Image (cartoon, rainbow, N blue to C red):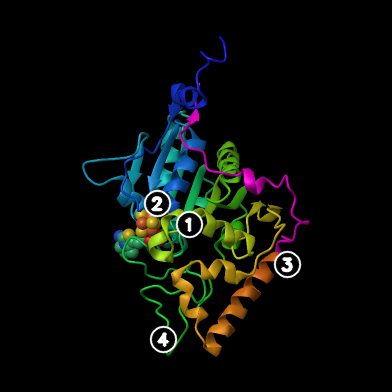
Amino acid sequence: MTADTAPSIPDLRNSQLRFRAMESGHRACLGCGQALAARLVTESAGPDVMIANATGCLEIFTTPWPESAWRIPWMHSLFENTGAIASGMEAALKAQGKSTKVIAQGGDGGTFDIGFQALSGMLERGHNVLYVCYDNEAYMNTGIQRSSSTPHAAMTTTSPPGKERMGKRHLKKDIISIIAAHHIPYAATASVAYPSDLRKKVRRALAIEGPTFLQIHAPCPLGWGHEGDQSIAVARLAVQTGLFPIIELERGRLAGAMPLRDIKPVTDYLKAQQRFRHLFQDDPRAREELEHLQALADHNIEVYGLRGEAPDKLDSEGADTVQRGGVRWA
Ligand SMILES: Cc1ncc(C[n+]2csc(CCOP(=O)(O)OP(=O)(O)O)c2C)c(N)n1
Ligand code: SF4
């Protein structure tokens, strides 16, 4: 084969066998972080997987009756019982002697709030299930209502800024610590801005026998108020400011953290989103909230030891771009 006859890289890519559990052509908004995250999770998991999916945007945009974007066994569960349905799937597969992996997945509303009881039971009983929470920090599917995952001071339709308060009054629930308190073998956070880290964590979690948990920060352009093409940049800033630490916990103990080599002020992240725009008006309450949010980021940086060394040219951040297409399965 000469250089003239050699196939081009795109042709080679297109001729590879691919497996995509979640097909394109679904109805997510442009730039939806959750759609990207779900694609990365299912590509990393491979074809021998069964999914229980809580109500929410992901369920709605992938399964408008009579269509479905799923090419693997997939079941819509309620908010309340996703953990229970996944437990039942896993027990049935075990009884049949099958090695098919089970993934349970849902949004932050379905995970932090409404489905938490079934999730906690699933973890406590030790089911061999990976639970993935796509954390877009509000109940997006029903019109951007605040959840217990919504960050402090963020504007949602049920936490509007006004005379009484500057957006959401309460703090974002520390779900990963609550999950870690179940002393499960593995729990981690990840972000769509760091896809290779995310993929590794999915593969690692699925290789472990027992319950595992992944919280993925997934921007929602509609609910956060940024353009769809800014989703990755916004997600990256959440990590770089310390507001969304990327960590791993084994049996409840901190086992790893992504170091921050170039820590950014929280205002870089907040300014990029309309849900925080009230914090940039000339109001002493706004300044106080900005200080509060900076203090939260500083706290994360200290508690998880996130402070890394000076920026390095070989830093993997630059190489962590999202690849198009599925992974190859022999
Ligand atoms: C028990 C119950 N309460 C409320 C609803 C209505 N509902 C459907 S989707 C949704 C929002 C889902 O939010 P989240 O879990 O965060 O997922 P997202 O849509 O943000 O991805 C709500 C409140 C429901 N289906 N069941
Ligand atoms: S509302 Fe948000 S989470 Fe839902 S499909 Fe649109 S971008 Fe995705």
* Amino acid type assigned to the residue bearing label 3 in the image: Glu
The answer to whether mark 3 is within 8 Å of ligand 1 is no
The x and y percentages for residue 62 are 32, 45
* Amino acid type assigned to the residue bearing label 1 in the image: Gln
* Residue underneath mark 2: 82
Q: Secondary structure at mark 3?
A: helix
* 91 left or right of 123 in image: left
Q: Are marks 3 and 1 in contact (CB under 8 Å)?
A: no
The x and y percentages for residue 161 are 42, 82
* Residue underneath mark 3: 302
**Majority SS type along the magenta span:** loop
Q: Residue at (37%, 76%) from the top-left corner?
A: 158
Q: Residue at (59%, 42%) from the top-left corner?
A: 196
In three-dimensional space, the C-alpha distance between marks 4 and 3, rounded to whole angstroms, equals: 33 Å
Ligand 1's quadrant:
bottom left
Q: Secondary structure at mark 1?
A: helix
Question: In this orientation, does residue 50 appear?
Answer: yes
In three-dimensional space, the C-alpha distance between marks 4 and 1, rounded to whole angstroms, equals: 27 Å
Q: Quadrant of residue 199?
A: top right
Closer to us: 246 or 85: 246
Relative vertical location of residue 293 with respect to residue 116 in this rendering, above or below? below
Q: Residue at (55%, 62%) from the top-left corner?
A: 175
* Residue underneath mark 1: 230
In three-dimensional space, the C-alpha distance between marks 3 and 1, rounded to whole angstroms, equals: 28 Å
- What range is drawn magenta here? 303-330
Q: Are marks 1 and 2 in contact (CB under 8 Å)?
A: no
Q: Residues within 10 Å of mark 3 (few under 14, many from 20)?
A: few
* Amino acid type assigned to the residue bearing label 4 in the image: Gly
